Amino acid sequence: MFVLFVLYSIISIIIRAVVRVPVASYWYYTVSVVPGWLNAILWLLYLPLVALCVLGIMNAVNGQMKPLPVIGKVFTLLK
């Protein structure tokens, strides 16, 4: 999960740095912001990561050791 959060963070930072919309321009500075639709899409991509993290925490609290859905299968194939 930590690796997925780090990958999401890096990709999100790069996308937000590249996709910007200028709002105001001064002779020495341009104010630009990230569009709202992009923030919404990145937030919707973040929700499954949080849900998987909650599932992992619930399993850990109950003393169970289960692979996470989808991610557990992918990482077992990488071994």
Image (spheres, grey):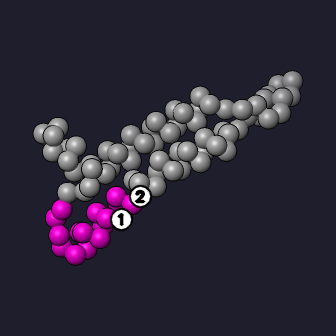
Image position of 13 (left or right of 4): right
> Mark 2 and mark 1 in contact (Cβ < 8 Å)?
yes
Residue 30, given in percent of the width and then of the height, sits at 78, 29
Q: Is residue 73 above or below residue 65?
A: above
Pick out the residue farthest to the left. 79
Q: Which residues are magenta?
A: 51-66
Hey, what amino acid is under mark 1?
A: Val
Magenta segment includes 62? yes
Give the CA distance from mark 1 to mark 2: 6 Å
Pick out the residue farthest to the top. 27
- The label shown at residue 7 is none
Mark 1 = which residue?
54
Q: Secondary structure at mark 1?
A: helix
Residue 69, given in percent of the width and then of the height, sits at 26, 55
Image position of 27 (left or right of 21): right
Q: Residue at x 83, y 33 (%)?
A: 24
Please tell me how many numbered marks the rendered image carries. Answer: 2
Hey, what amino acid is under mark 2?
A: Val
Q: Is residue 29 above or below residue 6?
A: above
Magenta segment includes 24? no
Mark 2 = which residue?
50
Q: Residue at x 54, y 33 (%)?
A: 15
Report the predominant secondary structure element of the magenta stretch. Answer: helix
Q: Secondary structure at mark 2?
A: helix
Residue 40, given in percent of the width and then of the height, sits at 59, 48
Quadrant of the snapshot with the C terminus: top left
